[in-house]
Amino acid sequence: MMHNSSAIALAESVAENIASTFLTNYFGSDIFIGADIERILAEQANIIYQDVADPKYSGAAVSYKGTHFIALNTHQTLRARYDSAAHELWHLGLDTNLFGDNHNKALKITNTPDFDTERAADHFAAAVMMPKDAIIRTWYKYVHNYSKPNRQLAQTAIIRVANVSSMPYEAVARRLSELDLLLAHHWSV
């Protein structure tokens, strides 16, 4: 069995590559999709909105007799729901030809026993909702005039990035960390 950090790295790498290709084919990597993620899903599947008070339930992707359904929990915040929608887009993409030329390659890798599909779905959601080019450009726009990084400035910049990307604050901080943007200037949150 693959070492846990190796499995995570593989899942994130595959998800990042597929997200990049998906964005290039459909939208471009220089914009934030934001709330449009639900329209994107609705073009590919039947969306079911559910109000479930369970904090552990965010959504699900189900296929039945060739029809695809995505359930989204409206009990969560809108930002969390958009993150969940992008996460479910990963599952939908693996079950359909949504990933185009990468579909067979993705299936080959994701069907291996050690592949961490849920980590890949989480990373795919971050990469689709906060494309690398867009988030780097936006981050530096918000922090470029400050030579001395500090906690308050970093938190303010994270809030601003969350606002333009329509993503949860925690997801923004994790994405910035994964892209070494917090570490690059010794930002701390």
Image (cartoon, rainbow, N blue to C red):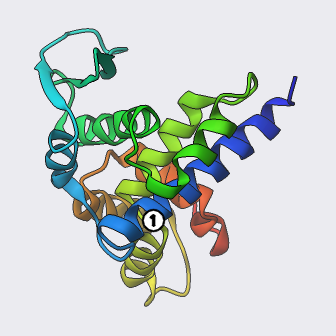
Picture quadrant where residue 154 is located: bottom left
Residue 97 in percent (x, y) is at: 40, 44
Q: Residue placed at 20% from the left, 10% from the top?
A: 53
Residue 118 seen: yes
What residue is rendered at 58% in x and 59% in y?
A: 17
Position of residue 99 measured from the top left corner of the image (x, y, whole percent): 44, 51
Query: On the rendered structure, is 4 left or right of 108?
Result: right
Q: Position of residue 157 (x, y in %)?
A: 37, 67
Q: Write the residue at 35% across / 33% down.
A: 88
* For residue 163, above or below residue 132: above
> Residue 155 lies in what quarter of the image?
bottom left
Question: Does 43 sit left or right of 172 as displayed?
Answer: left
Direction front: furthest residue: 65
- Crowd class of label 1 (few under 14; some 14 to 19; many from 20; radius 10 Å): many
Dot 1 falls on a residue whose secondary structure is helix
In this rendering, position of residue 78 left or right of residue 90:
left
Quadrant of res 153: bottom left
For label 1, the residue is 154
Q: Is residue 77 above or below residue 23?
A: above
- Residue nearest the viewer, comparing 147 with 65: 65
- The amino acid marked with disc number 1 is Ala
Residue depicted at x 28% and y 14%:
64
The N terminus lies in quadrant: top right
Task: Confirm whether residue 157 shows in the render.
Answer: no
